Image (cartoon, grey):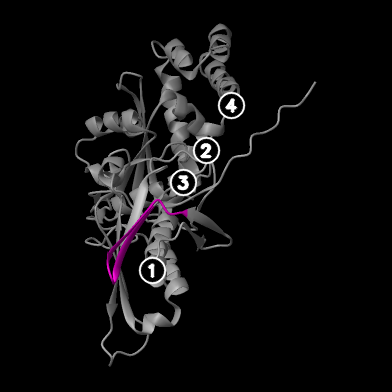
Amino acid sequence: MTRKKKKHLRTGFTTGTAAAAAVKGALVYLRDHQPPHAVHIDFLTEGGVRIPIRRAERIAANRALCTVIKDAGDDPDVTHRAEIGAEVELAARDSSGDGLGRISIEGGQGVGRVTKPGLELPPGESAINPGPRRMIIAAVDAVMAEKRRAFDVRIRIFVPEGEALARKTLNARLGILGGISILGTTGIVRPMSHAAYTATIRSAISVAAASQGDTAVFTTGRRSERFAQQYLPELREEHFVQIGDYFRFAMETAAEMAFASVCITVFFGKALKMAQGIPHTHAAKSALVLDRLAEWTRASTGDDRLADKVRDANTARQAFDLLAPRNQGIIQAVGARIVKAATVFAGGRLGVRSIIFDYNGKVVSDSAARERQDFHDGN
């Protein structure tokens, strides 16, 4: 029997690397008086990449434009195959100026602008993050060398389809309007890495922290977020953060940012995984999750037949349908276990509330309501 070969996943490069390549291509054009076919860009860690130039235009004696095509490799990315460009102008310095010429970097068409506090850049700035800015400066230095003593370099990054692409991201929620962000902490995109998603979660939590509130509401996707916003209308949009499968990471990050509390709002499938303290809920095996739920069911009800049905369920949704009509206590216990696991991940540094929705958006467990009931029952 022959073993199937594991597919080798192709790495790619970030929007920041693409922007730096476009800048370098424009500068090479100005220096050599002919358009380059490709340029080499060093990553911020180690290694680099050679990137073909898609389009090059000489606008004036001191101004040129280049674009490249962003390649995310085998990593899913809304900016994969997007055209990213730079218009670069060299401006002669005053002869009395000292030191190197200045480099100014701004966003043009399709590059978002920061409008809310809590991100790496202050409101009013173009959404070109520090990592890409360092790569752009390195690209300028690589081409200009000593000439930077005679010239200021003015750079405008643009993404022709950036505004349309931004509508497929969470940029508007983060307060980045008008286009995409130019991102990258290393310059390289590693297939199926979690860096981009966790960076987005961290940014969203940071924006929530800066939005005049001490509570963040964690959801696992757009649907659970919509139901959470309907259930908690008193909270601002910025306080809702989609964490996907990153349960532990989100709790640790919220604790770092000194929130007073976090509210976790989920459907039953994710709720089961969180209740079992699984740090990254995508990785959990459904059979093991349902085995544990079956144990809880047996301990709570003493009903072996029901517990076996839960264990044999095809999905968490089927298990939920078995329990929901008459065994609300088990579902509420799952909610309480979420609170316990989340509190552990947060190091006990913040309050935690859990809300579980049924698959139509009705709340079937709210740990805050349960706590109020326990208080009244005890008094």
Which of the marked residues, 1 or 2, is nearer the chain's N terminus?
1
Q: Which residue is mark 3?
A: 71
> In the image, residue 41 lies at what x, y percent?
50, 61
Q: Is residue 56 magenta?
A: yes
Q: Which residue is mark 1?
A: 33
| Structural crowding at the residue carrying mark 2, measured as other residues with C-alpha within 10 Å and reported as few (<14), some (14–19) or many (≥20) | some
Mark 1 near mark 4, Cβ–Cβ under 8 Å? no
Say what amino acid the circle numbered 2 marks. Answer: His
Which of the marked residues, 1 or 4, is nearer the chain's N terminus?
1
Q: Secondary structure at mark 2?
A: loop
| Structural crowding at the residue carrying mark 1, measured as other residues with C-alpha within 10 Å and reported as few (<14), some (14–19) or many (≥20) | few
Mark 3 near mark 1, Cβ–Cβ under 8 Å? no
* Residue 126 sits in quarter: bottom left
Q: Nearer the viewer, mark 3 or mark 1?
A: 1
Residue 280 image label: 2
Which of the marked residues, 2 or 4, is nearer the chain's N terminus?
2
Residue in the image at 53% along x and 9% along y: 306
Q: Which residues are magenta?
A: 52-67
Q: Secondary structure at mark 1?
A: loop
| Structural crowding at the residue carrying mark 3, measured as other residues with C-alpha within 10 Å and reported as few (<14), some (14–19) or many (≥20) | many
Residue 169 image label: none
Q: Nearer the viewer, mark 1 or mark 2?
A: 1
